[in-house]
Amino acid sequence: MEITKELLDQMNENGVYETMGIRIEKANDGKAHARLRPPPKICWPFPGQPHGGVLFTLMDATMAWAVLSQAEPGQNCATISTDIQYTNPARGDRFTCAARTTHRTGRLGFVRAEISDAKGQLVAMGQATFRIIEMDFVRA
């Protein structure tokens, strides 16, 4: 499926992404890239550090877009399992996530991702399995 800038702009306007400060920047050829600019209200329990669940959501969303970039029109995906390791404290106000599909079968996508802070330090890494489902996620 071709992931256009217009489609990403439309999908980035959802309440979850906007509340958490997530923006999917590109997705193509089994890869996706996103950024996180967490607002202070989600930096809990430590000021200046987004909650681990926010990083998990960033990673899950980015990995899903990597899978979707190889999907056929009319397909979507759902997370089956995710494993994440937090390697360093996530301090700061800018993070990036890069994801890539490592293997694909007829109905499954396997993805790895890393989240880095503004200095390029790895703060989390993970992998996930996604189920490819027949469901158009863009509805008129």
Image: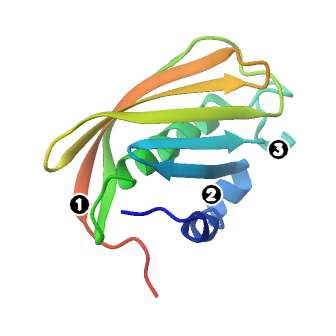
The dot on residue 133 is 1
Instruction: Look at discs 1 and 2 and give the one toward the viewer.
Output: 1
Circles 2 and 3: CB atoms closer than 8 Å:
no
Looking at the image, residue 39 lies above or below residue 85: below
Whichever of labels 1 and 2 marks the residue nearer the N terminus, that label is 2
- Quadrant in the picture for residue 120: top right
Whether residue 37 is visible, yes or no, is yes
Horizontal and vertical percent for residue 112?
Answer: 40, 28
Q: Residue at x 66, y 11 (%)?
A: 88
For disc 3, the neighbor class at 10 Å (few under 14, some 14 to 19, many from 20) is: few
The residue wearing badge 2 is 16
CA separation in Å, label 2 and label 3 = 14 Å
Horizontal and vertical percent for residue 18?
Answer: 71, 58
Residue occupying the far bottom of the picture: 140
- Quadrant in the picture for residue 91: top right
Q: Give the SS element for disc 3.
A: helix
Whichever of labels 3 and 1 marks the residue nearer the N terminus, that label is 3
Whichever of labels 2 and 3 marks the residue nearer the N terminus, that label is 2
Q: Residue at x 60, y 27 (%)?
A: 115
Circles 1 and 2: CB atoms closer than 8 Å:
no
Looking at the image, residue 85 lies above or below residue 35: above
**Amino acid bearing label 3:** Lys
**Amino acid bearing label 2:** Val
CA separation in Å, label 1 and label 2 = 22 Å
Instruction: Look at discs 2 and 3 and give the one toward the viewer.
Output: 2
For disc 2, the neighbor class at 10 Å (few under 14, some 14 to 19, many from 20) is: few
**Amino acid bearing label 1:** Ile
Q: Quadrant of the N terminus?
A: bottom left
Q: Give the SS element for disc 2.
A: helix
The dot on residue 41 is 3
Q: Give the SS element for disc 1.
A: strand
